[in-house]
Image (cartoon, rainbow, N blue to C red):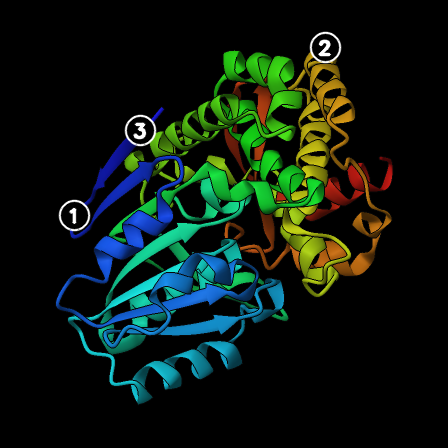
Amino acid sequence: MNKSFFIKNNNSRCNIIIKSNYIQNYLNKLIRKKRKIFCIVDINVKYLVKEILELDNCTIIFIKANESIKNIKVYNKICEKLLIKKIDRNSIIVAIGGGTIGDLVGFVASTLLRGIEFILIPTTLLAQVDSSIGGKNGINTPFGKNLIGTFKQPNEVVIDTDVLRTLSKREMKSGYAEIIKHALIKDFKFFKWLDKNYKKIFNLNNKILREAVSKSIEIKLWYVKRDSKEELISDNSRAMLNFGHTIGHALETNYKYSNKLNHGEAISIGMITEAKISQKFGYLNNKNLELILGHFKRTNLKIFDPQIKNKKTIDILLNDKKNSNNQINIVLLRRVGSSFFKRNIDIKKITDIINKI
């Protein structure tokens, strides 16, 4: 199954291509263009660029990718390397790697020389279904995750599920957390389909995996097209895609973005916590909460971390980008497949619920 999606907003166009065993062919076509190509590549997938390493019009920068690279120091370093190599506005930047590479390189591409064409080739499940879609780019600070960033759509996103065969089970589950999130906020049928097919996804059944990726992207794009810059205009806002992220990002920040808790694990814990908050406020009934908990337990997704009750985590919650006037704005559930944006919750109410979990 080959599939493509197309996004067009005011000043941007993005083509999303889903194909098998395609990356090498794509890169070979790309470097034939009469333009300078700059590839910023996660060292873990350096094998993907071995055929273009020595080409004159192609500069390759390898980087050891993890959440800690998303900072102003690494951003400056990459910009300086590109400028030394005489990058210009006619150049193309290609990001090859997981979500941290995509977020960082997208931020570089959107700011260097006031904007350069860039292409994303996501190589993790998490990046393929989430961070590579929608045009969000950014870096972290000690005050919170992605607090410095831009909206800029990549010109093209190339998704090849064959590269996922190199991932660990832990990384696959991290990506799966974002897939189940899309089902929880928007599509009950997709939730039931995942409940039936999750083992095949984890076992890298290519047909089922591509279906899961494609459906997940479809749901994300539904929101992105209605609210590309997360302006919170309605419950169709792309803010719904932040379900689990208010709590999850606070946990990640408390852990200083270390590998002790990866993004998907933090979001998984965040989703369960925010589902329980939905239930305590009377929006989500017990039957739906049990459906969610049952699936998370069957798939061995994380549902709790003691640091969630830490005062520091609670304090970090207030720095979330969606908040205002020291009030929490958060995505909650009405049922599996239906979400809404709840505004102006007193932090004490959230704290009381979290402390009783």
Q: Check disc 3 and give the amino acid type.
A: Lys
Residue 185 seen anywhere in this rendered image of the structure? yes
Q: Which residue is mark 1?
A: 10
Distance from Cα at disc 3 to Cα at disc 2: 36 Å
- Where disc 1 sits, the SS reads loop
Looking at the picture, tell me which residue is in the foreground, 185 or 16.
Answer: 16
- Where disc 2 sits, the SS reads helix
Residue at (85%, 42%) from the top-left corner?
A: 355
Residue 3 is tagged as: 3
Residue at (69%, 14%) from the top-left corner?
A: 285
- Where disc 3 sits, the SS reads strand
Quadrant of the rendered structure where residue 254 is? bottom right
* Labelled pair 1, 2 in contact (Cβ < 8 Å): no
Give the image location of residue 149, x and y in percent: 42, 64
Relative to 150, does residue 141 appear above or below in the rendering?
below
Give the image location of residue 235, x and y in percent: 42, 29
**Which marked residue is nearer to the observer: mark 3 or mark 2?**
3
Q: Which residue is mark 2?
A: 287
Q: Check disc 1 and give the amino acid type.
A: Asn
Q: Quick one: label 3 or label 1, which is nearer the N terminus? A: 3
Q: Residues within 10 Å of mark 1 (few under 14, many from 20)?
A: few
Relative to 208, does residue 44 appear above or below in the rendering?
below
From this viewpoint, which residue is outermost toward the left?
34
